[in-house]
Amino acid sequence: MSSSATAPEAPSFLHQRVLLAEEEAEALTRGMVALGVSRNQILGPGEIASSPRRPLSPMKTDLVPGHERTLWQECDTLVSRVSRLESLLQTLKLTVFRLETEQELDPTRAANLKQQQLENEEEQKVCWREVMKLREQLQQAYQERDDARTELQTVSGTVEAAIAAKMDLGLAAEELKTVKLEMNQKFMKMKEQMMQESTCSAEAMKSHSRLLQRVQEMEREVEMERRQGLRLYSDYRVLGVEVQSSRQQLEEEKERVRQLEEHCQQLREQTAVKESLISELKTEIKVNHNHLVKTEQKTQSATTADRSQLLKQLKEQDLLLKASRRTDLQMALTDSVCLQKELEKLKGEHAELLQSFSIAQETADNHKELLERVVERLQGELSMAQKQEEARRKDLEDSKHELRLVVTKLEAEKSRLETQLGKAKQEAASLSSALQAEQDETRRLLGKVASLEQHQQVEQMLKDKLPHEKRKLKMSEMETRGLHGPPGSGISLEDCTGFKLSSHVRHQEVQEQEVETLRNDRLKAHREIRKHRVEVEKLQQILTSSNSNNNKAIQSLQKALDTAKGDNNRLAHSLEQAVLTNCSLQSKLEQVRDQYQTTVSLRDEELHEAQSKISYLCEQLGTVQQQNGKDYESSMKRLQEISELKMTDGSPKTDHELQHQVSELENCVSNQEACFKVQRSQLRQQQKCRCSQDSSQKLERAKENIRNVHEKEKDDRKIQMIGGDSKQVSSRWEAEMERWTSTLQRWETKRDLGHKPGRTQLMTHSH
């Protein structure tokens, strides 16, 4: 084969060589048939009908270098087998030629020729079988070539998929970079918002402290004034909205206020009864006065006595009125003392409420600190995740760099091996050409050897014939000596025969020398052929080792690619998990922020409502106090006027004036009682509405707080699953939940108990 033949051209070239070998084998079979051997004995019945096969189409050129090397190796093996087959055919030709010469020279060796023919036939059958095996191997090589093509296509597909995966990983890394930048921006915004929220919370705390100062000022005003218990009650109710544990006490205070109102109603009823008695007494006074007037008309003498009696009766009535007034004043004083005691109780409860409010504020501060700690911890986890991602990226870059180095090394080795393979192919081509030349020389030498053997056989025959001819010559000489001539002619014949013999011997020696030189040349050629075969085998071993090394390198590269794919998949999975954790943390932070804002807004609204209620109740208290003061002053003035009138002397004009004043006083008292009843009914309705609204609002807020607490517990548990240290947070939240539930239970029990004693007290008062 020539060195310029490529891998696709090698099978067609080998097929041509195989066809030539088949044609030569066909010629040899014809020669054997001419020698007397049948065609069926040489080829067999199944091989006669077999037709020569056509060469296959050349392969595609887009092959991987490793598979091309395997194809070259298979082509080299096929070349070696074809050369062996051709050498066997040459040996067969030589044997056929030798058999023909032996048959021509020695017809007595027919049996040996037959045996040799049989051996040649067997050898030819073996050669034919080897040719068929070579054909099968060629077909297998073509099949392997097709399989290699399919494998190459699959490998190219996997390589393209790996390249696409790398591109996708690059795009994903870029997207992650953008996402990280966005996350950093969001974190900066979150920090700014947290700073703003901290400033807002500080401002809210300042405003809260201001409100507390205002509340303290209001408490001082309450201490200055006695009858501002309602204001304290409103403060108590407002603070009870913020702290749910004070709800029970508020209910108790409401019940106490109701009891006091009922007691006031009873006192007012008693005053009404007393006023009715006074009116009856006034009517009696009028009747007595009329009777006195009649008696004055009848008798003037009895008037003085009647007047004295009337004066006594009036004095007694005044004494009774004074005693009743004193009892009323004592009752009012006792009520005021009770109210002062209740005010002191309310002050103590107010102090307790302030303490509970401070505790609630501390819990809110602690909750805020916990949230800040959680945010800091989450930020630390985010920074750790970012560092891990950077480390993974560095590892990826290092692995990519190592893969590139390995690929460059393998490419260098590949180029070096390709150069070595090209050199080996050139050497193999030169060796094959040298082998071809040596085979031609061996053929030529074998032809010469065969001709020399024929010549030797002829000479041997001549040698065998020489003594017989010598004897004939001697007999003829003896005859000629005895019959014809003189002895000189016999000497000349002997000389001629001796000269012929000497020339024949010399010619034979020369031929023997030539045969020995030819044999030596043949031995040298065989030795060179063996050397070349050894070199070819060494080159084949080198090629196989290089192919195995290349296959190992390709396998290592495939393993490295698989590991890189696995690492890339792991990195993508870890990055997705980091993104999901970041999203969940952001959502949790937003939820916590919204909850904090809602709590702050609720507190502000409650404080505003409390302030408005306090101002409204203060105004109502002022109006009620003014009205009570005016009523008290008017009643005192009228009592003084009545006493002055009693002290003066009786006359009909004074009696008429007294009657007129008494009627005016009755009208004023009735009007005041009606106003008091209307105001009491309004106050009761307002208190009932407010109590119902406050109770419903408190229940709803308690439920919302419990829901928020449950949600916070869930969030904290999730955060605990993400983070590590979560026992303290869970214990705190459990304590808060227990406290909330205990306060709700206490409030409900106190509310139930408050309804029962209120009813019992009402029953006792009614009795």
Image (cartoon, rainbow, N blue to C red):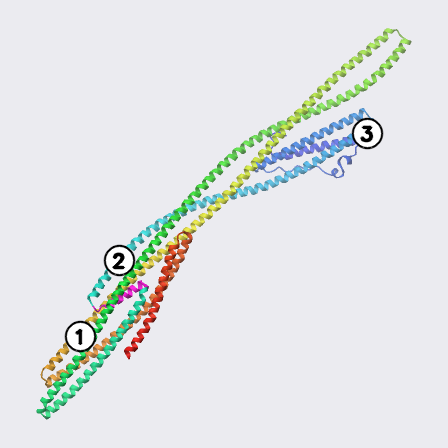
Residues at marks 1 and 2, CA–CA distance in whole angstroms: 42 Å
Q: Is residue 163 visible?
A: no
Q: Which amino acid does label 2 sit on?
A: Ser
- Image height of 51 relative to 357, above or below: above
In this rendering, the answer to whether 220 lies above or below 494 is below
- Residue occupying image coordinates x 78% and y 15%: 504
Q: Does the segment drawn in magenta span residue 466?
A: no
Q: Viewer-nearest of labels 1 and 3?
A: 1
User: Can you give x and y, in whole percent of width and height, for residue 624 in the image?
Assistant: 21, 71
Secondary structure of the residue carrying tag 2 is helix
Give the mark toward the camera: 3 or 2. Answer: 2
Residue range corresponding to the magenta coloring = 226-244
Q: Which amino acid does label 1 sit on?
A: Tyr
Determine which residue is flagged by label 2: 207
Location of mark 1 (residue): 632
Left or right: 369 as drawn, with respect to 326: right
SS at mark 3 in the image: helix
Work out whether residue 66 or residue 317 is closer to the camera in this orientation and state it.
317
Q: Quadrant of residue 306?
A: bottom left
Image disc number at residue 111: 3
Q: Earlier in the sequence, mark 3 or mark 2?
A: 3
- Name of the residue lying farthest toward the right: 483
Tag 3: Cα neighbours inside 10 Å, few (<14), some, or many (≥20)?
A: few
Labels 1 and 3: the sequence-earlier one:
3
Q: In which quarter of the image is the C terminus?
A: bottom left
Q: Which residue lies furthest to the left in this view?
A: 301
Q: How far apart are marks 1 and 3 (CA)?
A: 172 Å
